[in-house]
Image (cartoon, rainbow, N blue to C red):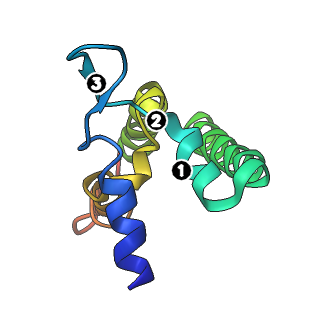
């Protein structure tokens, strides 16, 4: 029951349109990545969540700098895209983004036979 409530709350962040001014002015508010951290842990959640997400992004960047190959470049560009659109929402809150990251991490760019990654 609680999982369904949490899922519904996250899904409604861009599905419900609110009156934002007198008259018929309606808009759906983009919540940015901070809303998800705030919903989980208030101000401490924003602090810890932002630090962890920043550390994760930094790790992906350093990993690419140390070992420049197609897989690490794809992961870096994927994370860059997530950071760029974080003004709309936390990218990993959308299941398609999270699943795509897992597929990229574990299944893309597998070595075939004796071929080496470039």
Q: In this view, does 47 lie above or below 102?
A: above
What numbered label is drawn on residue 27?
3
Instruction: Tell me, yes or no, whether the two marked residues, 1 and 2, touch with CB atoms within 8 Å.
Output: yes
Q: For mark 2, what is the residue? A: 31
Q: For mark 1, what is the residue? A: 36
The quadrant where residue 4 appears: bottom left
Question: Observer-nearest residue: 66 or 18?
Answer: 18
Mark 1 and mark 3: Cα distance apart in space: 19 Å
Q: Is mark 2 on a helix, strand or loop?
A: loop
Which quarter of the image is occupied by the N terminus?
bottom left
Q: Where is residue 104 in the image (x, y as percent from the top left)?
A: 32, 56
Which quarter of the image is occupied by the C terminus?
top left
Q: Where is residue 113 in the image (x, y as percent from the top left)?
A: 23, 69
Q: Position of residue 23 (x, y in %)?
A: 24, 14
Closer to the chain start, of discs 1 and 3, is 3
- What is the tally of numbered marks visible in this picture? 3
Closer to the chain start, of discs 1 and 2, is 2
What numbered label is drawn on residue 82?
none
Residue at 30% of width from left, 51% of height from top? Answer: 12
């Amino acid at each position: 029951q609680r999982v369904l409530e949490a899922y519904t709350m996250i899904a409604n962040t861009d599905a419900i349109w609110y009156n934002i001014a007198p008259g018929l002015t309606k808009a759906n508010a983009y919540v940015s990545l901070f809303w998800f951290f705030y919903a989980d842990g208030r101000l401490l959640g924003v602090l810890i969540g932002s630090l962890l997400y920043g550390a994760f992004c930094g790790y992906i960047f350093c990993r690419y700098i140390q070992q420049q190959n197609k897989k690490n470049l794809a992961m870096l560009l994927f994370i860059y895209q997530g950071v760029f659109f974080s003004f709309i929402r936390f990218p990993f809150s959308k299941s398609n983004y999270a699943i795509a990251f897992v597929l990229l991490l574990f299944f893309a760019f597998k070595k075939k036979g004796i071929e080496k990654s470039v």
